[in-house]
Image: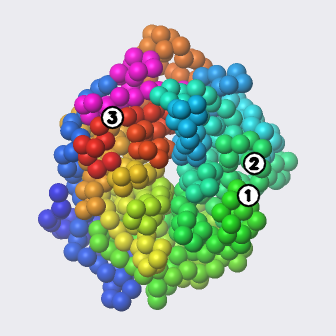
């Protein structure tokens, strides 16, 4: 439903006006009629209800009628080598799909957004970036972030293995057309003074361990990386930054455009987006339909360490990433918290999530400010160099801080919530929501994970990794479809479970 009144928002925007640049108008930007969403529409798939997992028998998810799922790779489950599955499952994508002995075989690479976890230790992959023992947020040990590889043969999960170790806060990323995964560190820490290495990079991960080097792609910049989306027509890689109200939108143009494993590690040129003809534009409080022509400013030092930065509204200390400060000084635009990104082949568009656009309350200061709202979804047309706001939430009913995003082979858009939980007509729980071309959202699934000690034991899970508790308010992450469109793979970050969902997709837009 389109909001009919703007009185409350107008007042809130006025209260925060001193913290924002003026709205963009005219040639370079279009301020549409004040349009946001305040609730979801009925789902074309029908209402959701608890459905039992075909693996454990537990009602872990709420799904529409006709959909089934299998869980796999719970945190703590033994992998192929006997090591425990790492925790904090996050971004993920299918990197290979083929026929093996007449059956479809699907291979995925999955992120683990971990820091220092004694239970996990260093992910035991053949490629490891940083092996130092470090102090990080009251913990001491080796870095536990990285990636794992999962395989499904036919309709059954068959394998899991380590793929990359020694990284930190591997949040999202993106697939490449040549069948690898670009995993992103959402962190700017530097452990050089502890015998370690700087972090905040993108790494390429292959399903073939011999092809994964553990080498950071420093040309893509050192910052709080979230996601990447690669345009196969040009080879350019678009990158989001998740750093509250000091986040840029970037483009990396590789020196080696062969589009093969290892080519991105050869370097290239990093750029930051700028609204054409407008310096230092702020896109913190958009309206659906806002459209901007984009140009790019070159980042001279992509690997520059964090730099002083004090522009308001701002709540992350007094430093920002080196690439952002350079780009902002050259007139680059500012987003709130850039998160998910996905290239949609049918439309030749890149979908981009900004998880906290809109006006809301900064819990630290108590102030009502732009960049603390419910979030938006943008489309970027790389051919026309045009950025358009497709969706802006004004109420958690319509969307509660979306994070990861994916597009199905049929062209349907699916979003993962990470807003800390939302109760609706189907009860409490974070949601996966579809997004229509008109910018309307609908509920496809809800997190229904609430585990007793008896259920954990009956499912054969490790109490060291899976604690008794209600996990329904924890985020979805890593949603991705296989190329045939039969399977939707997705993670719940905590307690750490991967799901394969299938059903009558043809009933709706996905």
> Can residue 310 be seen?
no
Which region is colored magenta?
52-75
Left or right: where 295 falls relative to 185: left
- Callout 2 crowding tier (Cα within 10 Å): few <14, some 14–19, many ≥20: some
> Can residue 39 be seen?
yes
Q: Looking at the picture, does residue 94 appear above or below residue 83?
A: below
Q: Looking at the picture, does residue 60 appear above or below residue 255?
A: above
Image location (x, y in percent) of residue 308: 65, 70
Image location (x, y in percent) of residue 138: 68, 38
- Residue 503 image label: 3
Image location (x, y in percent) of residue 302: 69, 70
Q: CA distance from mark 1 to mark 2?
A: 8 Å
Q: Earlier in the sequence, mark 1 or mark 3?
A: 1
Q: Image point 37% across, 49% down: which residue?
A: 414
Q: CA distance from mark 3 to mark 2?
A: 35 Å
Pointers 3 and 2 in contact (C-beta within 8 Å): no
Task: Looking at this view, name the residue that lies furthest to the left.
Answer: 4
Is-magenta flag for residue 367? Answer: no
Figure quadrant of the N terminus: bottom left
Pointers 1 and 2 in contact (C-beta within 8 Å): yes
Q: Image point 58% across, 57% down: which residue?
A: 177
Residue placed most toward the observer, 482 or 123 = 482
Label 1: state its secondary structure. loop
Question: Mark 1 sits on what residue?
Answer: 262
- Residue 211 image label: 2
Label 2: state its secondary structure. helix
Q: Image point 47% across, 28% down: which residue?
A: 155
Which quadrant of the structure image shows residue 235?
A: bottom right
Q: CA distance from mark 1 to mark 3?
A: 37 Å
């Amino acid at each position: 439903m389109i909001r009919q009144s703007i009185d409350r928002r107008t007042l809130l925007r006025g209260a925060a006006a001193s913290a924002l640049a003026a709205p963009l108008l005219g040639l370079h930007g279009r301020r549409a009629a004040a349009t946001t969403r305040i609730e979801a529409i009925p789902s074309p798939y029908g209402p959701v209800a608890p459905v039992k997992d075909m693996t454990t028998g537990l009602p872990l998810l709420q799904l529409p009628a006709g959909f089934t799922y299998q869980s796999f790779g719970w945190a703590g489950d033994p992998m192929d080598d006997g090591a425990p599955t790492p925790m904090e499952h996050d971004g993920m994508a299918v990197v290979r799909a083929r026929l093996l002995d007449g059956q479809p075989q699907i291979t995925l690479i999955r992120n683990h957004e971990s820091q220092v976890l004694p239970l996990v230790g260093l992910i035991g992959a053949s490629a490891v970036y940083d092996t130092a023992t470090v102090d990080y947020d009251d913990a001491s040990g080796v870095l536990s972030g990285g990636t794992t590889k999962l395989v499904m043969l036919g309709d059954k999960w068959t394998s899991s293995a380590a793929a990359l170790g020694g990284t930190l806060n591997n949040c999202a990323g993106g697939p490449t057309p040549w069948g690898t995964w670009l995993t992103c560190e959402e962190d700017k820490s530097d452990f050089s003074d502890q015998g370690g290495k700087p972090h905040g990079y993108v790494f390429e991960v292959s399903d073939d361990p011999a092809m994964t080097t553990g080498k950071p792609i420093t040309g893509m910049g050192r910052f709080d990386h979230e996601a990447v989306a690669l345009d196969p027509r040009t080879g350019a890689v678009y990158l989001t930054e998740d750093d509250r109200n000091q986040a840029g939108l970037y483009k990396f143009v590789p020196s080696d455009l062969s589009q093969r494993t290892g080519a991105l590690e050869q370097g290239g040129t990093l750029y930051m987006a700028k609204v054409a003809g407008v310096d230092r534009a702020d896109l913190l409080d958009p309206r659906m339909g806002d459209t901007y022509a984009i140009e790019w400013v070159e980042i001279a030092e992509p690997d520059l360490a964090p730099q002083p930065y004090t522009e308001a509204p701002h709540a992350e200390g007094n430093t920002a990433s080196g690439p952002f400060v350079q780009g902002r000084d050259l007139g680059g635009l500012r987003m709130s918290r850039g998160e998910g990104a996905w290239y949609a082949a049918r439309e030749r568009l890149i979908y981009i999530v900004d998880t906290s656009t809109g006006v809301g309350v900064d819990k630290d200061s108590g102030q009502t400010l732009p960049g603390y709202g419910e979030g938006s979804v943008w489309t970027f047309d790389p051919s026309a160099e045009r950025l358009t706001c497709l969706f802006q939430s004004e109420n958690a009913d319509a969307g509660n801080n979306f994070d990861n995003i994916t597009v199905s082979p049929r062209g349907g858009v699916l979003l993962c919530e990470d807003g800390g939980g939302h109760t609706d007509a189907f009860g409490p729980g974070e949601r996966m929501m579809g997004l229509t071309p008109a910018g309307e959202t609908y509920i496809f699934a809800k997190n229904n994970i609430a585990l007793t000690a008896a259920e954990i034991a009956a499912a054969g899970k490790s109490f060291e990794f899976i604690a008794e508790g209600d996990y329904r308010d924890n985020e979805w992450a890593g949603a991705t479809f296989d190329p045939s469109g039969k399977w939707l793979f997705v993670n719940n970050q905590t307690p750490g479970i991967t799901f394969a969902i299938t059903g009558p997709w043809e009933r709706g837009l996905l």
